[in-house]
Amino acid sequence: MQVIQYQDTSGQVMVARVPSDGTAAIQLGSQLIVEESQQAVFLRDGKALDTFAPGRHTLTTMNLPLLTRLLGLPFKGKSPFQAATIFVSTKTFLDLKWGTKEPVVFRDSELAMVRLRAFGKFAVRISEPQLFVNSVVGTMGLYTTDGVESYFKDLIVARLNDLLGENLKSIFDLPRLYDELAAGLKTRVADDFKKYGIDLADLFVGAITPPEEVQKLIDERSGMAALGNMSEYMKFKAAKAMGDAAQGQGGGGGVAAGMGVGMGAGMGMMLPQMMKEAMQEGAGTTPAPTPSPTPAAAAAPAAAQNEAPPATGEADSESTPAFCSQCGGKLPGGARFCPSCGHRVTE
């Protein structure tokens, strides 16, 4: 009597053969124990005879034909019919990774030609144990997820190249298309998995990125766009630098003091222009021009020159008419300001 079972402690074994090095004579009445997350494929004479579901099974002539004690008599009690049990894990294997080994060339509508790297994860489970064993595992004693991961990650990348070429115009559109690309990629590779008896449970696109040097150029481009008004940015940087230098004068010694003096001199040259621009922006209008004298006021000095001098020859401040030295307008007696232009009258 034998008990045939297999338990995986690593969580990465997809198929395990018992015995691992070939076949053995299995006695009638032996107990086959299949775990809940397993199926067992029974092989005899190199062929798969049956697949056992989870549970405990007693091996008899009803489920193992021709395996009887009588068959072993001519061979000194050793059965000439060797058999093996292959345990196939039916659980979902998570955290399998795919990615590009080398950057792929992509024609971008904004960046012209650019090389892209892509990576992500996928999850699989074995849906047809006999098909998977016959087409993939063969006579191996142990088969892990490394074999599936190594093969299918290249297949996923190949299908992704076609998908990007057909549906993507620029890498700047990628953030809003990751879900759509993942769904389309899963649909395209599902049949490739299915023909080996594997179901593709999930597939995710982690990231699609250009090379590091291209990323730096994109960062510089976005930084220039974020600055907006370069003049306002330079004013802000100058004011911040002056503030930092002023704070450093207290504990920075001569170096900080020198920096403070230099920044102060530079700001002294910049502040008048900055204040002028600020006042103009705050007022919203340009300063009003100085009013020009009226034609009558401009003609007044000429008329005053043509007037005859006083007959008496004595200067009388109250009777002699006076004129504004600024606009030439006539001043009333005792006036201290010109009524035409507002200029102060000098005595």
Image: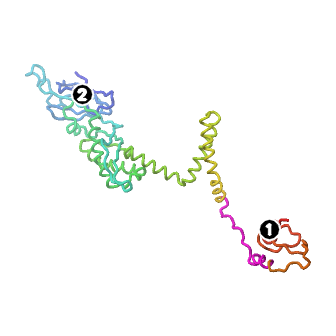
Instruction: State whether residue 339 is above or below residue 98.
Output: below
Tell me the magenta residue range.
282-304
Image coords of residue 133 (percent x, y): 22, 36
Tell me the residue that label 1 is attached to.
Answer: 342
Image coords of residue 153 (percent x, y): 29, 41
Q: State the residue in front, 344 or 185.
A: 344
* Secondary structure under the numbered disc 1 in the rendered image: loop
Residue at the limit of the structure toward the front, as seen here? 313
- What's under tag 2, amino acid-wise? Thr
Q: Is residue 295 magenta?
A: yes
**First along the sequence among labels 1 and 2:** 2
Instruction: Give the colour scheme shown.
Output: rainbow
Q: State the residue in front, 15 or 248.
A: 248
Q: Residues within 10 Å of mark 2 (few under 14, many from 20)?
A: some
Q: Disc 1 to disc 2, how far (Cα)?
A: 123 Å
Tell me the residue that label 2 is attached to.
Answer: 58
Q: Is residue 137 magenta?
A: no
The answer to which image quadrant residue 273 occupies is bottom right
Q: State the residue in front, 323 or 58.
A: 323
Image coords of residue 121 (percent x, y): 35, 41
- Residue under the image location 59 percent in, 47 percent down: 238
Image coords of residue 110 (percent x, y): 39, 55
- Residue under the image location 64 percent in, 48 percent down: 268
* Secondary structure under the numbered disc 2 in the rendered image: strand
- What's under tag 1, amino acid-wise? Gly
Lateral position of residue 178 relative to residue 276, left or right:
left
